[in-house]
Image (cartoon, grey):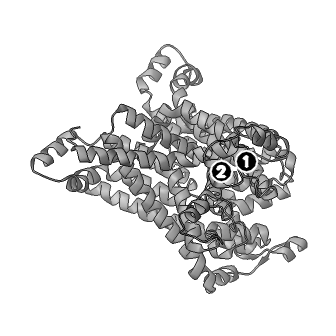
Amino acid sequence: MIHRTSPLGRVGIWCATVVLVAFTLFPIYFMLTTAFNGQATSGTDALLPKNLTFDNFSRALGDGNFGRFMMNSAIVTVVTVLFSCGIALLGAVAMARFQFRFRTTVLIMILVVQMLPAEALLIPLFLQMKDLQMLNSLFGLILVYVAFSLPFAIWNLRGFVAAVPQELEEAAYLDGCGWWQMFRHVLFPLVVPGLIATSAFSFVMAWEEFTFARTFITNEPTMTVGIGLFRFFGQNTNDWGGLMAASSLVTLPVMVVFVLAQRRLGAGLVQGAVK
Amino acid sequence: MPVSRRRPWLLLAAPLTVIAALLLWPIIRVTYLAFQAYGLEEVIAGKPRFIGLDNFREILGGDYLWKVVFPNTLVFAFVAVVGTIVLGTLVALLLQRLGTVGRAIVIGSALLAWALPAVTGTYIWVWIFDPDAGVMRTALEGIGLIGPEGYNWFTERLSFYAIAVTNVIHHSYPFVAITIFAGLATVPDELHEAAMLDGASGWRRFWSITVPIMRPVFAVVTILSTIWDFKVFAQIYLMPGGDGGNPDIFNLGVWSYITAMAKTNYGLGSAIAVLLTVLLLLITLIYVRALFREDELR
């Protein structure tokens, strides 16, 4: 595109970029400098890293028990991602490749359930889990997270499945494949990028989820990271160094996943949005 | 039934079962609970009691909903959505004018802000605005804007929500900016070139060319942002006072949660949750209607 920008305009663009990047990165920078700072008793002390130390991290992992919480979250997240992406793929194939009665109804229902607020589902699900004695169990959390990530996962994957040319499927049939064989050897390998993008979204949701974890889990051995942070904050109200160290530990895996899935993330959003 | 007719339902069996059991059934159950008295007494007795519309009368009849909770929910969502869309659009337009390096820096930092979990992000903003030792207090005190007695931003409704809005916009503008930036690539250059030859200003070209062509993209990001910002929970609950200490700053979600979980009044909490759900359904419906009308016109 042609943009004839005057020197003054160029300065403006420069300033805007600097201000934007500063606003965007400041919280992350501030979290890290507080986490690595030996004496983060006030915000201005924490601004510039002095007395670099890992003390805050060892305190978070020791007293704060963050190693345990991260392990729990890792288990919940991995199982949630595998289950939700697995069954979402089946659903996405049905929605993208077959014409059947009530197809539109199912599609609209999948759209509408995405809009339901967690707060509305929380009360009945809490009572249900209490009745089934599944409070304080990671399995209960996994069930809820699978259900929560499923509608978006189906919606997102549908775009990727629809993008695979139908001719490839027909070629597989001509070679004598049955439907499941075609699914395994043709369709599945081609939607792997879509599965990666979808997993990234489920991963982030399950890893950092707070509302259900706060309600379902009250025993320390089964706490996940979201609720672990909350408890740490309550117990050590003024230990900002420890809290920011724990926050950094929670943030790191999400950033890694985002950076790894970055290209596919974009593709998934565009294809998902345009149907 | 031939296999080909049965297959879609075979494939859908697992996902639909999960959705029905863990999303649809709870929504039916919460609606049912909204018409029951289900507090501590009934929990001990082991049985909720049907009371018709009493829960809704209690919510809608009091001043609290109209003077505190609704304004908190609606004004917050409105400001957050408008702020997110405006900033996201400006960033997308900025991205178009930057070179490769500038683009990489802006997109990279936006991705990091997007990846910052809502829970940790909220704690960072609370730490920045901490009334005792936060960087904002020491900075303002240093230049003499506030006295040595300090100032607690979290007790006042307006300043509380100003911080919440900053937090939410910081977290959600990257999605909008990246989506709109991708959409901008679909606007043909020729239109802008022709308009420029006619002497149209950048402002004019934005409203007469970019906005009409990009309307579906804007619609999608606005719908999603509205739905997200209406049901914001952790970002409010985790701020000082948000977990029940300061009823002035509750929104619908937090009010429902505190009523049901902290005060063990499941019936009333369910009624508030139903109200929130109905509100979200209405908003989605209005947006979808508007979208479809646009489609018919074209």
Q: Residues within 10 Å of mark 2 (few under 14, many from 20)?
A: some
Check the image and report above or below for A209 versus B142: above
Task: Look at 74% across and 46% down and name the residue there.
Answer: A225
Q: Can residue B230 be seen in the rendering of this structure? A: no
- From this viewpoint, which residue is outermost toward the right? B44
Res A39 label: 1
The answer to which of B241 and B293 lies nearer the viewer is: B241
Check the image and report above or below for A50 versus B156: above
Q: Can residue A274 be seen in the rendering of this structure? A: yes
Q: Amino acid at mark 1?
A: Gln
Question: Which percent across, then down, holds residue B288?
Answer: 42, 59
Res A45 label: 2
Label 1 with label 2: CB-CB less than 8 Å: yes
Horizontal arrangement in the rendering, residue B238 relative to residue B88 (left or right): right
Horizontal arrangement in the rendering, residue A68 relative to residue B290 (left or right): right
Question: Which percent across, then down, holds residue B256?
Answer: 68, 69
Q: Give the distance between the C-alpha atoms of the residues marked 1 and 2, in whole angstroms.
A: 7 Å
Question: Which percent across, then down, holds residue B46?
Answer: 88, 70
Question: Which percent across, then down, holds residue A131?
Answer: 85, 58
Q: Amino acid at mark 2?
A: Asp
Report in which chain the residue with disc 1 lies.
A
Label 1 and label 2 in one chain: yes
Query: Which SS class for mark 2?
Result: helix
Task: Look at 37% across and 43% down and name the residue there.
Answer: B181
Res A77 label: none
Horizontal arrangement in the rendering, residue B39 relative to residue B289 (left or right): right
Locate residue A69: give its quadrant.
Answer: top right
The answer to which of A273 and B101 lies nearer the viewer is: B101
Position of the C terminus of chain A, as image quadrant, is top left
